[in-house]
Amino acid sequence: MHTETGCEKDLRRVRQFDGVPDLACFTEQLHYNLEPVVLRNSCFDWQPVREWSPERLEGKLADQMLRISSSASGYFPDTGSTCREKLSGRAFFERLKDEAAGRSPRYSYLDGSETFFNLGGESSSALVALEPEARPPRAVLSPFLVKSALWIGGGGVHSGLHYDGNGCNNFNVQVCGRKSIILLSPKYIDRLSMLSPDKFAHLGHFSGLSLDRDDMAGHPAFSELTLYHAVLDPGDVLFIPALWFHAVTSLEAFNANVNFWTLPDSTYLTPLLKDLVT
Ligand SMILES: O=C(O)CCC(=O)C(=O)O
């Protein structure tokens, strides 16, 4: 197990801010710093953080059809074994219980494919019962919301290293459980063996280095790269700047997040894109 200071490679701790900064402070000191930041405990009073339990979510979603991914390894996407299917919320929560009890060889994941809000398309009718409770909290420090989505899964789920293909900033709010996240600057894109979109349709924003968190810190591919690390608890928000790579490991038996993608502005993007092309 790697720690933030030890073993093969040091992980740099993501900058932390306690609570919700005011917009000017966030914009000037945090966002334009071009690095991720954890807004610690900034959503402790948000209704989902206060009220969503596995039982409540199951009750609200039981009769809805959800797009669920599953894989044999727990890695998403596992290009060999990931499959997608529509399951009722009731069947999905039963599966999570079976997985937690060791009664299933697969890992199931509601991986952000159901949306509360979707500027570019329809939001999911499956989430209507939860939507009024999932409006952006104060810690989503942008008026330019593009999309928000729900993530629910058990322990051992790992979202592989990728950047968000929509090019947006991401305010990722931890609601239940805990997640460990490794982040890397987009300037390393050439070193990350990106999957070919010709071979893996829709996965061109994923790195082909299929590594879990522990492998990652020790892997030679990363030896010269700065890896940032954060662990999110309920009520924390991770701000992932547009195009930053992230790999996410679910740590508890039940984990839920809501993320909010917002439009990045050109003041932020210009230096970032300059860095990428020079
Ligand atoms: O929580 C996860 O497993 C992945 C989250 C993610 O990739 C995102 O918020 O863009």
Image: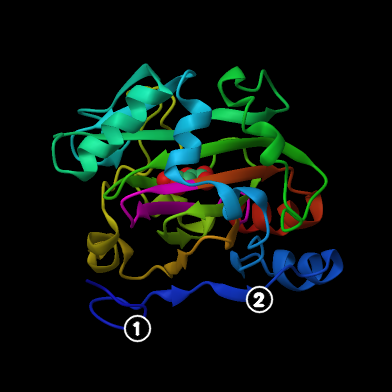
Q: How many marks?
A: 2
* Amino acid at pointer 1: Thr
Under circle 2, the secondary element is strand
Q: Residues within 10 Å of mark 1 (few under 14, many from 20)?
A: few
Could you tell whether 51 is left or right of 5 in the image? right
Q: Residues within 10 Å of mark 2 (few under 14, many from 20)?
A: few
Horizontal side, residue 241 vs residue 219: left or right: right
- Residue projecting furthest to the right: 24
Q: State the image coordinates of residue 74 (x, y, percent, origin top left).
A: 25, 41
Taking 59 as reference, is 214 above or below it? below
Q: How is the image coloured?
A: rainbow
Q: Quadrant of residue 10?
A: bottom left
- The residue singled out by tag 1 in the image is 5
Circle 1: element type: loop
| Left or right, 193 with reference to 103 | right
Query: Can residue 28 be seen in this snapshot?
Result: yes
In the image, residue 247 above or below residue 104: below
In the image, residue 253 lies in the stretch drawn in magenta: yes
Question: Taking 182 as reference, is 40 left or right?
Answer: right
* Residue 162 visible from this viewpoint: no
Q: Quadrant of residue 278?
A: bottom right
Please tell me which residue is depicted at 46% across the width and 50% down the height of the picture: 189
User: How far apart are the alpha carbons under marks 2 and 1?
Assistant: 22 Å
The residues colored magenta run 240-256
- Counting from the top left corner in percent of width and height, residue 186 is at 53, 54
Q: Please determine whether, in this image, residue 190 is positioned above or below residue 77.
A: below
Q: Give the mark nearest the N terminus, 2 or 1.
A: 1
Identify the mark at residue 135; answer none if there is no mark: none
51 in magenta: no
Q: Is residue 103 above or below residue 13?
A: above
Q: Which residue is mark 2?
A: 18
